[in-house]
């Protein structure tokens, strides 16, 4: 870093961001137009296109960018190391892959035709995670354009497999650990607690994603001729799934909750002080009542307790009209969210044992593991949270709230294990922006506030 160069004021960078606001929005639209759905083979070329677009944008911002190809989708790696060996190195992570858009008929506008309305941009990936990834790149561009350098060294890693478990990024991090060595890791793939309420996420739940399939007769059977004489695989699967919870919403798979770590009473008391209401959450979810495990508050259920959820059920005749059959098979897609100190491999074994035990004679069950990730709890250095606090105070005018995360970001534990650096989870999405659902969107105000926050955060970390 050149000590004789005049350091720009935050207003200089903010002015740059304002002048280029419309270009940044157009670039976000261009990025969102690429249907980079990592879970579907038909979009493999789109994944390559998205990685190419991202690398080109990073180069345009002033970083050196390269694309690493391998057995999975491409990984984009970019660097700016002009701050010198004495300055901190900050690694920024994001992902350019998105969830499948369906059901498409529920979108007001096509999911890959970004639409601006009411101060929001609507498209698949708008908040998860293309918008939040791009705001970091635009902040880096603004800093480099205004001052000609950054206050810290920067590494940016963007993957294309986060929505499918990120199976290949972990090995990439291990193989390039020396190159990725850093002082801190910044991830924006989460949400604030509400409008104008920035939040630092200090816990994440882990995940085990599974398919459970029950097989019965070799072909469809007439339900009149064979009903009541053979085991129906759809009914068998329904009973297996219905037995997971008791009447109080507790998961009763033997051993499932044995390792759940209790939160200290002081932290549970802090949850009660957060500006959160069950009624607002119920309205956001658009449900008549909330449910869940008895004996815990809604926030405790979201952040402190494990889950077993069904994502999809398929069996037999589901088209229009009737077809009186016993189906040959039934399939459920499920996932378990895990909390410290649950182990994904152990939970996988326990679920398999439970399914085997509950499968009746006359049908056969098969369990397939799709993805796993362990839970995470922050062990952050005070200096990193102090810098984040300074940044949010400067841009949002308030201290950040400390919250838990109900979702999973598998790479966080991969980075922690391989690099040993503290992780800062500072997201700019809002509750109710529909990630993974139709009509996903991102508030343009938060897109721009995120750029400003990143710029101030880098300045704060550079003064460490």
Image: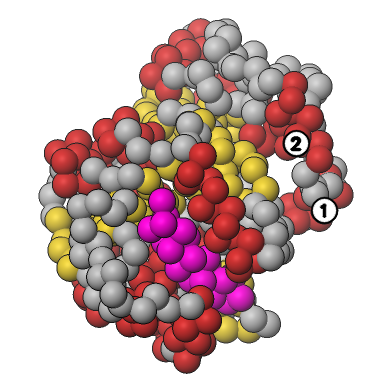
Would residue 352 be found to the left or right of residue 294 on screen? Answer: left
- Vertical order, 2 against 216 (above or below): below
Does residue 284 appear in this view? yes
- Which residue is the site of mark 1? 280
- Which residue is the site of mark 2? 271
Residue 455 covered by magenta stretch: yes
Q: Secondary structure at mark 1?
A: helix
Q: Kindly identify the residue that appears in the image at 25 percent across and 62 percent down.
A: 83
Q: Kindly identify the residue that appears in the image at 27 percent across and 33 percent down.
A: 418
Q: Kindly identify the residue that appears in the image at 20 percent across and 52 percent down.
A: 85
**Label drawn at residue 236:** none
Of the two numbered discs 2 and 1 in the rendering, the one whose residue sits closer to the viewer: 2
The image quarter containing residue 266 is top right
Which region shows up in magenta? 444-464
Packing grade of label 2 (10 A; few <14, some 14-19, many >=20) is some
Measuring from the top left, give residue 303's x and y in whole percent: 64, 34
Comparing 429 with 317, the one in front is: 429
Measuring from the top left, give residue 13's x and y in whole percent: 46, 80
Distance in Å between CA atoms under marks 2 and 1: 16 Å
Magenta span: chief secondary structure: helix
């Amino acid at each position: 870093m050149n000590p004789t160069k005049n350091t720009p004021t935050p207003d200089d960078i903010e002015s740059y961001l304002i002048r280029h606001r419309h270009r940044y929005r157009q670039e976000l639209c261009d990025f969102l137009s690429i249907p980079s759905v990592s879970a579907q083979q038909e979009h493999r070329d789109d994944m390559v296109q998205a990685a190419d677009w991202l690398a080109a944008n990073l180069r345009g911002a002033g970083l050196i960018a390269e694309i690493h190809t391998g057995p999975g989708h491409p990984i984009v790696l970019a660097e700016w190391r002009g701050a010198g060996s004495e300055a901190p190195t900050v690694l920024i992570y994001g992902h350019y892959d998105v969830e499948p858009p369906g059901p498409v008929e529920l979108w007001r506008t096509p999911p890959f035709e970004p639409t601006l309305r009411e101060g929001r941009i609507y498209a698949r990936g708008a908040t998860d995670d293309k918008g939040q990834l791009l705001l970091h790149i635009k902040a880096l561009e603004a800093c480099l354009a205004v001052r000609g350098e950054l206050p810290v060294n920067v590494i940016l890693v963007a993957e294309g497999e986060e929505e499918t478990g990120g199976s290949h990024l972990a090995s990439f991090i291990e193989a390039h650990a020396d190159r990725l060595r850093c002082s801190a890791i910044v991830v924006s793939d989460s949400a604030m607690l509400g409008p104008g309420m920035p939040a630092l996420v200090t816990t994440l739940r882990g995940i085990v994603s599974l398919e459970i399939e029950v097989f019965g007769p070799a072909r469809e059977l007439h339900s009149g001729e064979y009903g009541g004489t053979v085991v129906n695989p759809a009914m068998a699967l329904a009973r297996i799934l219905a037995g997971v919870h008791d009447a109080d919403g507790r998961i009763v798979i033997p051993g499932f909750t044995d390792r759940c770590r209790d939160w200290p009473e002081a932290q549970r008391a802090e949850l009660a002080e957060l500006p959160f209401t069950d009624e607002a959450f119920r309205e956001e979810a658009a449900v008549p009542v909330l449910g869940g495990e008895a004996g815990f508050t809604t926030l405790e259920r979201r952040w402190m307790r494990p889950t077993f959820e069904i994502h999809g059920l398929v069996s037999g005749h589901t088209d229009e009209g009737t077809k009186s059959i016993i189906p040959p098979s039934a399939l459920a897609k499920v996932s378990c969210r895990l909390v410290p100190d649950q182990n994904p491999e152990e939970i996988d074994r326990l679920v398999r044992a439970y399914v085997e035990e509950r499968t009746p004679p006359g049908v056969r069950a098969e369990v397939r593991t799709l993805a796993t990730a362990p839970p995470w709890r922050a062990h952050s250095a005070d200096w990193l949270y102090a810098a984040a606090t300074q940044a949010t105070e400067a841009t949002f005018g308030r201290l950040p709230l400390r919250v838990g995360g109900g979702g999973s970001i598998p790479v966080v534990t991969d980075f922690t294990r391989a690099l040993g650096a503290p992780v800062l989870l500072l997201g700019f999405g809002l509750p109710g922006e529909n990630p993974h659902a139709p009509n996903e969107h991102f508030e343009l105000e938060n897109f721009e506030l995120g750029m400003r926050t990143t710029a101030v955060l880098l300045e704060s970390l550079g003064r460490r």
